[in-house]
Amino acid sequence: MVIELSRQDARRIAVTAQLLDDHRPDDLVETVGRLGFVQVEPTAAVAPTADLVLWSRLGSGFEPSQVTEGLERDGTLFELDLLVRPMADLPLFLAEMAAWPERESTRRWLDDNEEFIDDVLDRLELEGPLTARDIPDTSLVSWPSSGWNNNRNVMMVLECLMRQGRIAVCGRRGRDRLWDLAERVYHADTPTVPMDQALRIRAERRLAAQGLVPDRTPDLPVETTRVGDAGIPAAVEGVRGSWRLDPAALDRDFAPRTALLSPFDGLIRDRKRMALLFEFDYALEMYKPAAKRRWGYYALPVLHGDRLIGKLDATADRDRGILVVHALHEDEPFAPAVRRAVINEIESLADWLGLRVG
């Protein structure tokens, strides 16, 4: 049986699944768990991505220090591949860590650098936590890349050891990750969920965080949006292709509100899905020359109810204590009530940042 959804119903399912309706959560760890993860992306034209994503759900009561506490002191969160997740989800990743890497070239590089790995682990045991800058490069064979990672041997070995579950990120010194032995970061009695079961649960959680996902969706970097056969089949009126639907999403009421989103927000990570459901034209333009930008360096999509209605081009000028609003781009002219709701949200963002709107 295929569930038939209107496009509006599909949008509302997506918004509610991402905790962006008016049933706002109030617990940080629970929120991260329901979203699946929050991304550590340091661009802070307004605020870092993880902070913006959590503020847009939790509101003014959220403080970025809560994430630091969860990672570095409480042990309620962990970081893997620049994604913050609940520590309770760690068992779903341990089997994959134990089997990593699949790629033969990576295995060969690690085998060729056994002494380098021993040096890194010994140094972390004796001196950790450490940043990559604190660790000398004693590799025998350089990382085989002609791109960004070429000869970044220390960072690459740290990331490989993290993916194997041998070391872990335990905090930050400025923007640099602090690394330590995994046994000092992860709970010692953490069970391992078998690989097949773990991958199935992760797909189900991924679907629950999105509400519904196209059967044919790109394998996005950072974290895939693919869910396999999780959920139930669905179709969206006026949209080609088949979808997978979280059946629990059908039982939720929709309560609209207005929100400002990070460019990396989970609602819009899959730009193709965004266009199909929301008919919204958007791209992050920070990598474009200024003259070619339509909406600004780091424009924040504006959500109102179940529609994406515009983009806020703003910059946090902390030296002057101002959230500088360069432009508020309206995809269609805002009705007076909509404009008031959007302005209220901009003012709430400024208050949370400790700035005034300018």
Image (tube, helix red, strand yellow):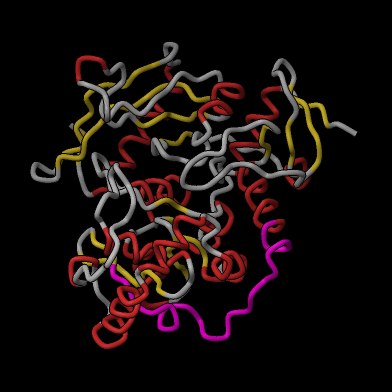
Toward the top, the furthest residue is 333
- Picture coordinates of residue 220 (x, y %)? 52, 39
Look at 43% across and 78% down and name the residue there: 182
Toward the left, the furthest residue is 319
Q: Foreground: 253 or 75?
A: 75
Tell me, yes or no, if residue 263 can be seen here.
yes
Q: Foreground: 244 or 133?
A: 133
Look at 38% across and 63% down and name the residue there: 67
Up-down relation of residue 58 to residue 210 (above or below): below
Up-down relation of residue 105 to residue 335 (above or below): below
Q: Is residue 346 left or right of residue 35?
A: left
Q: Is residue 194 within the magenta segment?
A: yes
Up-down relation of residue 282 to residue 131 (above or below): above
Question: In the figure, residue 17 lies in which quadrant?
Answer: top right
Task: Check the picture and name the quadrant holding the C terminus.
Answer: top left
Question: In the figure, residue 240 lies in which quadrant?
Answer: top right
Point out the stretch of residues depicted in magenta: 178-199
- Picture coordinates of residue 107 (x, y %)? 47, 62
Q: Is residue 277 left or right of residue 82?
A: right
